[in-house]
Image (cartoon, grey):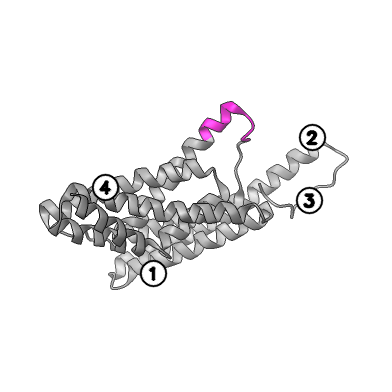
Amino acid sequence: MLAALALSFAVIFVAELGDKSQLMAMTFALRYRWWVVLTAILTATTLVHAASVFFGHFLGLSIPTALLSIVGGLSMLVFGFWTLRGDELDDDEASRAGRVGRSVFLAVMSSFLLAELGDKTMLATITLAADHDWLGVWIGSTIGMVAADALAIAVGRLLGRHLPERSIALGAAVLFFVFATWLVVDGLIGASAVVLASAIAATVVIVVGGVWWILATRRRRAAEAAAADPGLPIDRSASVR
């Protein structure tokens, strides 16, 4: 088991370096509490690699992943617009802080679940589990991926201390849009006409809805600011938090 653990740790850690999941971890760390992000990644990784070990060791099967990749890409698109819009909740209010933590935890966990299904680290885990101790592979692969993503989170937090908040938000949104394109295109390779048309329609709906959501939020917040201080002019181009 120890040999399988060590091998799995090394393989997954190296495979994760520079992977989209590591970049996603850095992006989330720029915007949210590092321990919430890392806990969500640990949860998602544990579940995904448990499934990988099950399929690889006990069934010897792989999972069709094209549709999951498309769904993951669409979710990244939503996260991008969510980041541009900004958060409504005040982190200084204790009653609201708990809800912020839960929503971020679920968002990060779900995005990593979708992104990792069919990713090379999952496929590597399935391959390792087919020929090695399943428990060692599960533990080693989970620790390897979390360690690599923890490294990315540390880098993200370090960068975040030297960047303006608005720049961080814009950069994070751009990365989410890049992830969305990456996943959707990857899932559409060789897809049928029905899947292609459905993915395009869903993308259009999300983009139109996201733009409307951001503009409506800006108008409402500007009106609220003007009502709170009538002497201030309404700045419709103000950054959204």
Helix, strand or loop at mark 2 = helix
Question: What residue occupies the far front of the structure in this picture?
Answer: 2
Label 4 packing within 10 angstroms: few (<14), some (14-19), many (20+): many
Tag 2: amino acid? Ala
Helix, strand or loop at mark 3 = loop
Q: CA distance from mark 2 to mark 4?
A: 54 Å
Nearer the observer: mark 2 or 4; the answer is 4
- The tag earlier along the polypeptide, 2 or 4, is 4
Nearer the observer: mark 4 or 3; the answer is 4
Nearer the observer: mark 4 or 1; the answer is 4
x%, y% of residue 241? Answer: 66, 46
- The tag earlier along the polypeptide, 4 or 3, is 4
Nearer the observer: mark 2 or 1; the answer is 1
Residue 79 in sight here: no
Q: CA distance from mark 2 to mark 1?
A: 46 Å
The answer to whether the residues at label 2 and label 1 have Cβ atoms under 8 Å apart is no
> Label 2 belongs to which residue?
228
> Label 3 belongs to which residue?
235
Please state if 65 lies on the left or on the right of 81 as rendered.
Answer: left
* Location of residue 189 with respect to 52 vertically, above or below: below
Residue span colored magenta: 90-99
- Which residue sits at x=44%, y=47%? 108
